[in-house]
Image (cartoon, rainbow, N blue to C red):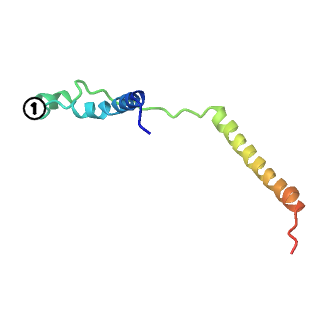
Amino acid sequence: MKPSIAQTVRALAVLLLFVPAPLGALATTPASADSPATTLLAQPAVEVPEEVEEEEEQPWTMRFLAPATIAIAVITVGAALAYYVVRIRGRYRVVE
């Protein structure tokens, strides 16, 4: 089956969408990257002391709601498994 012109144009458009981005990233390095001026620009102008973050108490949703949801999910899965073993699996017997 010979590809039509429209299919070829679509394929070329998709190719051009993805190829220039990586090629453009390679070309962004300036030719004078080893000059001393660029190494000075990489350092911060003013050193800012880091702020010490105080530990916040977790909100009630994380302390109570999340564990309760996990416990309900475990109980539900356990009940479904027990229902399967008792009702569904017990219904059928293999005759030998």
Seen in the picture, residue 92 relative to 59 is either above or below; the reply is below
Would residue 23 appear left or right of 6 to someone viewing this image? left
Mark 1 = which residue? 35
- Foreground: 22 or 79? 22
| Quadrant housing the C terminus | bottom right
- Foreground: 40 or 91? 91
- Foreground: 85 or 5? 5
The residue sitting at the front extreme is: 1
Q: How many marks?
A: 1
Give the image quarter of residue 91: bottom right
Q: Locate residue 46, reporting x and y percent.
A: 24, 24
Seen in the picture, residue 54 relative to 87 is either above or below; the reply is above
What residue sits 51% from the left and 34% below the top? 55
Q: Locate residue 78, reporting x and y percent.
A: 77, 53
- Foreground: 79 or 2? 2
Q: Locate residue 83, reporting x and y percent.
A: 84, 54
Would residue 60 appear left or right of 1 to someone viewing this image? right
Q: Locate residue 80, reporting x and y percent.
A: 80, 51
Would residue 73 appear left or right of 17 to someone viewing this image? right
What residue sits 59% from the left and 34% below the top? 58
| Quadrant housing the N terminus | top left
What residue sits 16% from the left and 32% below the top? 39
Other-residue count near label 1 (Cα within 10 Å), few / some / many at <14 / 14–19 / ≥20 = few
Seen in the picture, residue 56 relative to 78 is either above or below; the reply is above
